[in-house]
Amino acid sequence: MSVYQATASAPVNIACIKYWGKRDTKLILPTNSSLSVTLDQDHLRSTTTSRADPSFEKDRLWLNGQEEEIKEGGRLATCIKEVKRLRREVEEKNPNEPKLSTYAVHIASKNNFPTAAGLASSASGFAALVSSLAALYALPASPSQLSLIARQGSGSACRSLFGGYVAWEMGSSPDGSDSLAIEVAPQSHWPDIHALICVVSDDKKGTSSTSGMQRTVETSTLLQHRIKHVVPERMKAIKEAILVRDFDSFARITMQDSNQFHAVALDTDPPIFYMNDVSRSIIALIVEYNRVSIENGGKIKAAYTYDAGPNAVIYAPKENLKEIISLIVKYFPQAEPFKDPFGLFGAQGVGSGAVV
Ligand code: ADP
Ligand code: DP6
Ligand code: CO
């Protein structure tokens, strides 16, 4: 008897231009395009195994050992349904293929880092889910095609189908067929950029990304300014910075966009605070570090960015990492460099890390 099973991993991605707001909540179509860097496979990642078997009665999923309900019409159900639809096309073209699309699937996934803590677990989670089902069904689909499905699990997940520098183009089609991820540049184009993750708190966040951004769309006037007058220019400028490996521009845009995203969260009614005092102190430290460098005729040396949580991600050229880690350890004495899974992760992979 054949066993139909496949395992896939996907890393997290951390946005430099933030996705925050949906124009269609069911299809997960965003109010603006976004751009991120996918971290190295070796570090923060989700690993998912899918199995299809005629004896299974219904689709089921376990996340970190706990069974999660697959709600009808919900995000998990939509992703599974969409991947099965592509499998059916394969079976219709090749009648000799086993009819896996008619079997239920059992899916088990594990994150090697805190879930729902603002470290993009929904991104790696849904990317790994779609990748493992695509492998199970031997789908002839490109990463961009799979990104259309992962997007319907969690918006940010569409970008984790690619490594390196990735854009999610918002698209304009009402059916979402052009709202997908594309590669801006592979990681090998600019391997010098590393990401340092400072885990300020691994608690589950108070306001999920989904409900937070919905409230922002409903109440923030600043969001309207951002999506019309700010993000389109920033997308162009940061792509250009990546293509010419201009860290100064990349860093300025990344920090500005993180700041505006948190301003938009604050402009929401009731306001949302994702950063805490430690997050703000890390911003102050990086601002000061860059100021001293510029004053001495140098350049920007590091860029901070924060997602929907208090944890800092610092992008920097490799040569500055040691200095940055020693600064963080100096000013946050409770920070201790330590090994995976929390701590310092590079787009390239760096040995150890710092937890604040
Ligand atoms: P985060 O900041 O970690 O992305 P979100 O609030 O956006 O937090 O999403 C967290 C949710 O994503 C989880 O509650 C779970 O439903 C889903 N999720 C996280 N990891 C996985 C995974 N490995 N497989 C499937 N779903 C996942
Ligand atoms: C701040 O992708 O988690 O990390 O689409 O509702 O699942 P849903 O939201 P999610 O939002 C991510 C928001 C962000 C910015 C980003 O990753 O671009
Ligand atoms: Co998320």
Image (cartoon, rainbow, N blue to C red):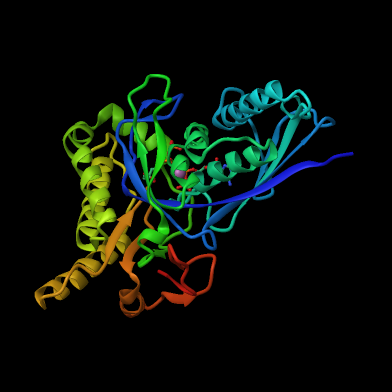
Report the side of 121 relative to 248 (left or right). Answer: right
Report the side of 34 relative to 237 (left or right). Answer: right
Tell me which corner region of the image, top left, top right, bottom left or bottom right, holds residue 246: bottom left
Asked if 49 appears above or below 148 in the picture, the reply is below
Q: Residue 233: x percent and y percent?
A: 18, 41
Tell me which corner region of the image, top left, top right, bottom left or bottom right, holds residue 75: top right
The residue sitting at 22% across, 40% down in the picture is 231
User: Which quadrant of the figure shows ligand 3?
Assistant: top left
Q: Residue 119: x percent and y percent?
A: 45, 53
Looking at the image, the residue that sits furthest to the right is: 1
Of the 4 image quadrants, the one containing the C terminus is bottom left
Tell me which corner region of the image, top left, top right, bottom left or bottom right, holds residue 248: bottom left
Number of marks in the image? 0
Of the 4 image quadrants, the one containing the N terminus is top right
Q: Residue 4: x percent and y percent?
A: 78, 40
Report the side of 53 relative to 212 (left or right). Answer: right
Asked if 356 appears above or below 234 in the picture, the reply is below
Q: Residue 78: x percent and y percent?
A: 57, 27
Q: Nearer the viewer, residue 218 or 6?
A: 6
The residue sitting at 20% across, 37% down in the picture is 226
Report the side of 83 relative to 252 (left or right). Answer: right
Q: Nearer the viewer, residue 163 or 14?
A: 163
